Image (cartoon, rainbow, N blue to C red):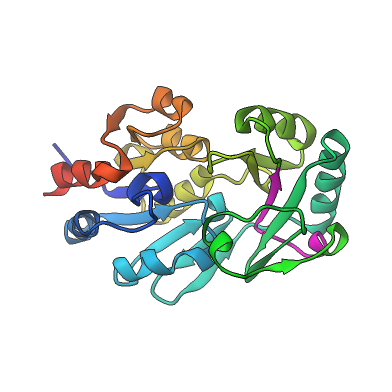
Amino acid sequence: MVSPRLVATDLDGTALRSDGTVSPRTVAAFALVEKAGAVLVFVTGRPPRWMGNVAGAVRHRGLAICANGALVYDLHTERIVESHLIGPEVLSEAVRRLRGRLPELSFSVEYEGGFAHETEFRLGGWDSREVSGLRVGAATLTSQPCAKLLAYHHNMDPDLLHVIVTEAVGDLLTATHSSGRALIEMSALGVTKATALAALAGRHLISSEEVVAFGDMPNDLPMLDWAGTSYAVANAHPDVLAAVTDVTAANDDDGVALILEKLYG
């Protein structure tokens, strides 16, 4: 069997353990990919500022597609090398529409060099463990271009919230979700993990049939649909489990490493 020329993997809930760490087995499996001469790409909803632990684990090699395709980040230089941003006018209109539909929503934005949030916005991930980000009003929040707009609801089902957000602003932005809570992530219209990955693969003259991709949440679906071979980890969202060509073990059981060892070991 010919090994894929490119490996694209989501991080949280997929290649990373539930505590956010990269297991030694997974680090070794990533090294196998690079030793075989294949391209390894991390394709994540994370912003670049959350990539430190992953960059260190892979010795600052390779590229990461961050913010669901909006930013391409060089792990070696720790610089953003490509960006697809949402303009202020679109941001303002999106927030206006969404607040009209659901007044209880609160918002944050991910800029190229940091983030800001409304006071009511509930921080998650790394941001909930440290004091970071600016607390600002909506007018300031939407006053400059950003990579990602996030809308949070305190108790709604995330799949239902995604439907409502898409109905309200689907002509302005591309919406998805990945956290398991009622937090919708919005990128510039048409920007997804798949669009950024396809562009990167094209620069390496790699076709979708030569790509294997791994994921666990709805924000991974465009990438998994595009890749010639797609794997969900066993802990994946039901929609992801239904969409992929194969299923591997859960993230805490090194499911990604298990497949990479078979492909490149």
Q: Which residues are magenta?
A: 141-152
List x then y, in percent, for residue 134: 72, 69
* Residue 161 to residue 119: above or below: above
> Which one is nearer the viewer's eye here, 189 or 113?
113
Question: Can residue 182 be seen at all in this image of the molecule?
Answer: yes
* Residue 208 to residue 31: above or below: above
> Which one is nearer the viewer's eye here, 78 or 226?
78
* Residue 215 to residue 148: above or below: above
Residue 146 part of the magenta-drawn span:
yes
Residue 233 part of the magenta-drawn span:
no
List x then y, in percent, for residue 121: 72, 53
List x then y, in percent, for residue 141: 79, 61
Outermost residue, left side = 265
Q: Is residue 251 left or right of residue 87?
A: left
Picture residue at 50% right of the left edge, 36% below the top: 222
Picture residue at 50% right of the left edge, 73% below the top: 79
Q: Which quadrant is home to the N terminus?
A: top left
Tell me the quarter of the picture where residue 23 sits.
Answer: bottom left
List x then y, in percent, for residue 214: 35, 41
Question: Can residue 206 be seen at all in this image of the molecule?
Answer: no
Picture residue at 59% right of the left edge, 55% below the top: 70
Count of numbered badges drawn on the protein = 0
Outermost residue, top side = 242
